[in-house]
């Protein structure tokens, strides 16, 4: 069976390689699979992560040859520091699926280790010989994971925009010290939504794209608007189910829940896709921080971004416009492109749109939403550490708290997996202070303190990285994004 992709906003269709290469449809819509392939649990019960990964990817990307796909899966996940790729750590009813064992310490590595390979292969399939320019807006973690994946990859360049004051010190440092001939990192004078909107506008700017074409450049995206990022994230939903069966926590066929700390709605949407492929998922629990637009939506059926943008201790979720929610609306509205287009236009012009009861009910059948305050995030880190001696990051803590609230509200005893999205060391200052109280020490110095005082080994040499030279110091305005890309590409020739 071969799956085609279509835009959420019009009749534009694409083969997988074309959808991956373009990143976003020229009408501003996102590519979605026309139908969902099924994946039988029985077929994957004895497989490891890589095996399951092949089964998922091959069902969505039929143009890729088996031997090649298997090779790039090996290359991508050999970079993780555990053979399990995404191990599960359990205490009582808390099961943490640790997605952060890749090179940059956040779950973005799971998809961004493989995306460069998918993209370069897609270019071959599409017979494109122009240089691929990856544009990326980041709330902190995508940027570094994409840089790591694309640095010095032949035939590509990458430009990353991050919110100047919206990322943790370590997230910033990871990006500004990035080496590579083909990389450009820019702080933008705005928040993540500004960066993401800027990038999306550049994608749909026909004249600008034509001018790039004249210099033999084409744009693509490493954000979760790219279907090539979303599909690899489906894998760990199946994998964690299989592992839970192997651990005797589930019988094959039993229902499972997942709690997902959510920003752009990419990670949790991959869980919905797993469900559409036949994984027995009961509820997808959507955990937000104080930027709780999605929680409000789950309550009222109205999406409303007209509100202050708050900076929180879980910065990778500081987002008011969750791009992938468009895909969900598309699927639950029965593929209603006209409705999606109208709603997204409204979101753009007035900042809000509403769905009818039928769509709302379809969403409620699959999702539960809640949020966690700043104070509760920190208390949760401390409580879990004191009870289990387990260190989690701020984003994971948001999910952990919301899962507790869900259980209180519903008494649902279905086995639940909490998606743990970042290493605690990536947010050292917040995690340290949550447990040990305020400290005057520089964040560089706290890394070792946190490791020593909690007996948690450092995953990579973050301390050395913190001392490395900043290679990227420029700040650009929202209006200046396009020009900065052009300047960078001109400098390269
Ligand atoms: C990106 C990110 C999230 C949010 O994931 P989405 O797919 O954008 O919803 C949560 N936690 C961390 C650590 C992240 O980097």
Image (tube, rainbow, N blue to C red):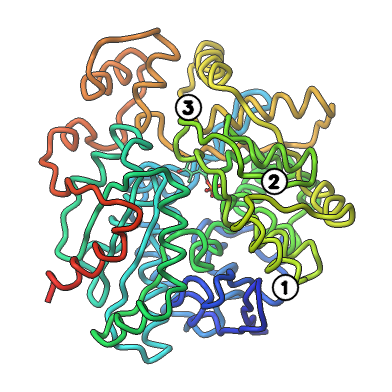
Provide residue 117's location: percent of width, then percent of height.
37, 71
Frontmost of labels 3 and 2 is: 3
Other residues around mark 1 within 10 Å, as few (<14) / some (14–19) / many (≥20): many
Query: As drawn, is 490 to the left or to the right of 351?
Result: left
**First reached walking from the N terminus: tag 1 or tag 2:** 2
User: Mark 3: which secondary structure?
Assistant: loop
* Residue 477 visible in the shown view: yes
| Callout 1 touching callout 2 (CB < 8 Å) | no
Query: As drawn, is 51 to the left or to the right of 448?
Result: right
The CA distance from mark 3 to mark 2 is 24 Å
Callout 3: CB less than 8 Å from ligand 1: no
**Which residue occupies the foreground of this view, 98 or 374?**
374
The residue drawn where x is 52% and y is 43% is 319
The CA distance from mark 1 to mark 2 is 39 Å
Query: As drawn, is 490 to the left or to the right of 296?
Result: left
Asked if 266 appears above or below 210 in the picture, the reply is: above
The CA distance from mark 3 to mark 1 is 40 Å
Query: As drawn, is 234 to the left or to the right of 316?
Result: right
Residue labelled with disc 2: 245
Provide residue 121's location: percent of width, then percent of height.
38, 80
Provide residue 246's location: percent of width, then percent of height.
65, 45
| Callout 3 touching callout 1 (CB < 8 Å) | no
Q: Quadrant of the N terminus?
A: bottom right
**First reached walking from the N terminus: tag 3 or tag 2:** 2
Residue labelled with disc 1: 337
Provide residue 345's location: percent of width, then percent of height.
64, 63
């Amino acid at each position: 069976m071969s799956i085609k992709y279509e835009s959420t906003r019009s009749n534009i269709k694409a083969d997988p390689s074309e959808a991956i290469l373009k990143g976003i449809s020229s009408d501003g819509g996102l590519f979605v699979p026309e139908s969902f392939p099924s994946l039988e649990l029985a077929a994957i019960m004895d497989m490891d992560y890589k095996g399951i990964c092949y089964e998922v990817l091959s069902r969505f990307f039929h143009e890729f040859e088996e031997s090649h796909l298997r090779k790039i899966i090996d290359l991508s996940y050999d970079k993780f520091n555990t053979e399990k790729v995404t191990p599960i750590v359990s205490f009582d009813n808390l099961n943490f699926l640790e997605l952060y064992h890749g090179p940059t310490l956040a779950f973005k590595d799971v998809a961004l280790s493989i995306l460069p390979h998918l993209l370069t292969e897609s270019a071959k399939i599409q017979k494109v010989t122009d240089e691929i320019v990856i544009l990326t807006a980041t709330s902190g973690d995508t940027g570094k994971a994409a840089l790591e994946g694309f640095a010095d990859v032949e035939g590509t360049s990458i430009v990353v925009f991050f919110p100047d004051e919206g990322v943790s010190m370590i997230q910033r440092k990871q990006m500004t010290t990035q080496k590579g001939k083909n990389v450009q990192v820019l702080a933008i004078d705005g928040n993540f939504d500004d960066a993401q909107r800027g990038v999306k506008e550049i994608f749909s700017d026909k004249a600008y794209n034509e001018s790039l074409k004249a210099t033999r450049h084409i744009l693509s995206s490493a954000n979760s608007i790219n279907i090539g990022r979303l599909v690899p994230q489906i894998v760990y939903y199946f994998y964690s189910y299989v592992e839970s069966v192997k651990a005797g926590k589930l019988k094959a066929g039993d229902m499972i829940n997942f709690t997902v700390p959510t920003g752009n709605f990419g990670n949790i949407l991959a869980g919905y896709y797993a469900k559409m492929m036949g994984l027995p998922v009961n509820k997808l629990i959507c955990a937000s921080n104080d930027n709780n637009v999605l929680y409000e939506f789950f309550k009222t059926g109205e999406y409303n971004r007209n509100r202050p943008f708050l900076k929180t201790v879980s910065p990778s979720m500081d987002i008011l416009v969750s791009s992938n929610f468009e895909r969900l609306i598309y699927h639950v509205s029965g593929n209603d492109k006209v409705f999606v287009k109208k709603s997204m236009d409204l979101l753009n012009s007035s900042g809000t749109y509403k769905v009818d009861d039928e769509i709302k009910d379809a969403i409620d059948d699959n999702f539960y939403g809640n949020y966690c305050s700043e104070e509760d995030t920190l208390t949760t880190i401390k409580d879990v550490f004191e009870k289990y001696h387990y260190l989690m990051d701020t984003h994971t803590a948001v999910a952990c708290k919301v899962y507790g609230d869900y259980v209180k509200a519903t008494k649902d005893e279905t086995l639940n997996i909490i998606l743990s999205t970042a290493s605690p060391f990536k947010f050292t200052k917040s995690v340290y202070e949550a447990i040990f109280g305020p400290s005057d020490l520089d964040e560089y110095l706290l890394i070792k303190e946190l490791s020593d005082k909690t007996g948690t080994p450092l995953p990579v040499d973050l301390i050395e990285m913190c001392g490395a030279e900043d290679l990227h110091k420029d700040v650009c305005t929202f209006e200046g994004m396009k020009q900065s890309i052009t300047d960078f590409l001109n400098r390269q020739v």
